[in-house]
Amino acid sequence: MKRRQFNSLPLLALAGLTAVAVQQAHALTLADLSNADASKGLKTALEKGALSAVGLLGAQDGFLGNPQVRIPLPGYLNDAAQLLRTFGQGDKVDELLTSMNRAAEAAVPQSRELLLKAVQNMSVTDAKGILSGGNTAVTDFFASKTRNDLSAKFLPVVTQATAKVGLVDKYNAVAGKASEFGLVKKEDANIQQYVTNKALDGLFFMISEEEKKIRANPVGYGSAILSKVFGALQ
């Protein structure tokens, strides 16, 4: 029995040395990565995060069923809505809220092309700087490159979707007056623009959530390049 234990010691030592060697081989730092790897890893993360966010939000109840991104009425109008409910007007409030969130769900799929284009056009030299930034550096990059164009693309879809609700004109009239007294932000006084802005906020929020997951567990996303690049940041 003792002889077997003695003979196993060299094997255990060899296994330990092998494990250390493997760990050292994978203990890359950001400086060790080539620009090509950094760029490829970042682009892979962008694509995965963006497409996942679009898929989640662009589905039925993507906004309405998600309390993290569900679009409420702005400012004092949200408080006024509670008062309307007490007077039996809850159905109309719910109709407007549902319409707003459905409009956002309809608009988000329009972002797919622009988001992927931003990925393709990203420069290699920017990649390492974005990778070494904070947990939402990728998302911030996305927003800076696409938000204005996405707003222009979302607005017609939102306008068409909200036009089906008769309360839209009343909302704009009331919100317009409220903005004059500082009760509602000027950019929120138009329901179409308000929903468009909130849809974009929700989109970039969900992209940031996906980005955090990728950074925290790149192996879980089944991509060798993500493991290599984001593993170097941990």
Image (tube, rainbow, N blue to C red):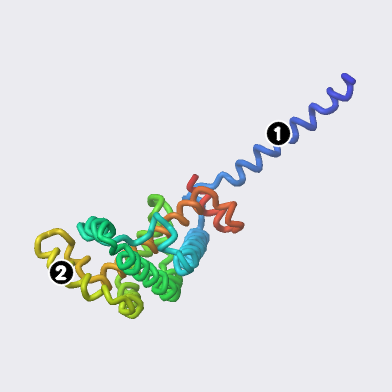
Label 2: few (<14), some or many (≥20) within 10 Å?
many
Nearest to N terminus: mark 1 or mark 2: 1
State the residue at coordinates (89%, 21%). 3
State the residue at coordinates (41%, 68%). 122
What is the x, y in percent for residue 12?
76, 31
Task: Name the residue furthest top.
Answer: 2
Amino acid marked by disc 1? Gly
What is the x, y in percent for residue 58?
45, 69
Kindly identify which residue carries mark 2. 176
Answer with left or right where residue 114 lies relative to residue 96: right
State the residue at coordinates (38%, 52%). 133
What is the x, y in percent for residue 215?
49, 51
In-front residue for pair 5/167: 167
Res 16 label: 1
Amino acid marked by disc 2? Gly
Q: Is residue 101 above or below residue 134?
A: below
In-front residue for pair 139/227: 139
